[in-house]
Image (tube, helix red, strand yellow):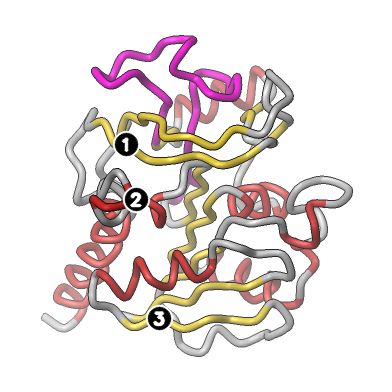
Amino acid sequence: MKFGVVTFPGSNCDYDAYSAVKLIGEEVEFLWHQSTDLNGCDAIILPGGFSYGDYLRSGAIARFSPIMKTVINFAENGGLVIGICNGFQVLVESGLLPGALMRNDHLRFSCKYVYIRVERIDNPFTGDCRLNQVLKIPIAHKDGNYYNFKGDLEKLQKNNQILFRYCDPEGNLTKTSNPNGSMENIAGITNREGNVVGMMPHPERAVEMILGSADGLYIFNSVKKYFKEKMKFENA
């Protein structure tokens, strides 16, 4: 399969995402934000960073990049899209995912390893995980405090759209394990169809033990596994 990594002005995790895909042995190429062609990619990564300097509101300007029209169309037709950190903010601003990412409740930039619990495994991005598995993945953000209106949050829970929650190393959801004040300890969500995912932690920075964890590989290998099974089914 082929991954595409979108580069916005200010992206700084695009090369990390590119390297992570290379590590699992799949094809990958960069997609410039002014392009309107996904070049036949099967999965799109919106990487972390500071698209357009994060001026105005994180991700609010990037959503108007020419490539986002193509990404939105791709996603609405079932294409696999994952937004990581700033990429998550871009997906929310684009309307592909519900809610908002607000300033961390402590109002400081936070860069450290955290633990997240896998809430569901019937998803293209978590199929290689175990239910309730705890992953050690780093965060690096100032605007990662997930918020949604009460009624919409209830819909999110009812539709099983919460993919990851911040937890302690044992998988317990505690206030101290929540690094930014996110509602319900939410670290990552999916759209109702399951093909679009946004997460604040950086799996692309946790793909080798020399980095402190290789748990991010579960995310990338899940996509690879999903796509191979899909191809096997379609070619049967």
Alpha-carbon span between mark 2 and mark 3: 18 Å
What residue is pinned by disc 2?
Answer: 206
Q: Amino acid at mark 2?
A: Ala
Q: Residue furthest right?
A: 56
Image coords of residue 15 (percent x, y): 49, 71
Q: Earlier in the sequence, mark 1 or mark 2?
A: 1
Which of the labelled discs sits on residue 136, or is there none? 1
Q: Amino acid at mark 3?
A: Val
Q: In the rendered image, which quarter is residue 165 located in? A: top left
Image coords of residue 32 (percent x, y): 65, 81
Q: Residue at x 69, y 36 (%)?
A: 143
Q: Examine the rendered structure and indicate whether residue 91 appears above or below residue 175.
A: below
Q: Residue at x 43, y 40 (%)?
A: 138
Q: Nearer the viewer, residue 192 or 94?
A: 94
Q: Quadrant of the N terminus?
A: bottom left
Q: Nearer the viewer, mark 3 or mark 1?
A: 1
Q: State how many labels appear.
A: 3
Image coords of residue 136 (percent x, y): 32, 36
**Per the image, is 172 magenta?**
yes
Query: Main SS of the magenta segment?
Result: loop
Q: Amino acid at mark 1?
A: Lys
Q: Which residues are magenta?
A: 164-193
Q: Quadrant of the C terminus?
A: bottom left
Q: In the rendered image, which quarter is residue 150 located in? A: top right
Q: Examine the rendered structure and indicate whether residue 116 appears above or below residue 73.
A: above
Q: Examine the rendered structure and indicate whether residue 106 appears above or below residue 53.
A: above
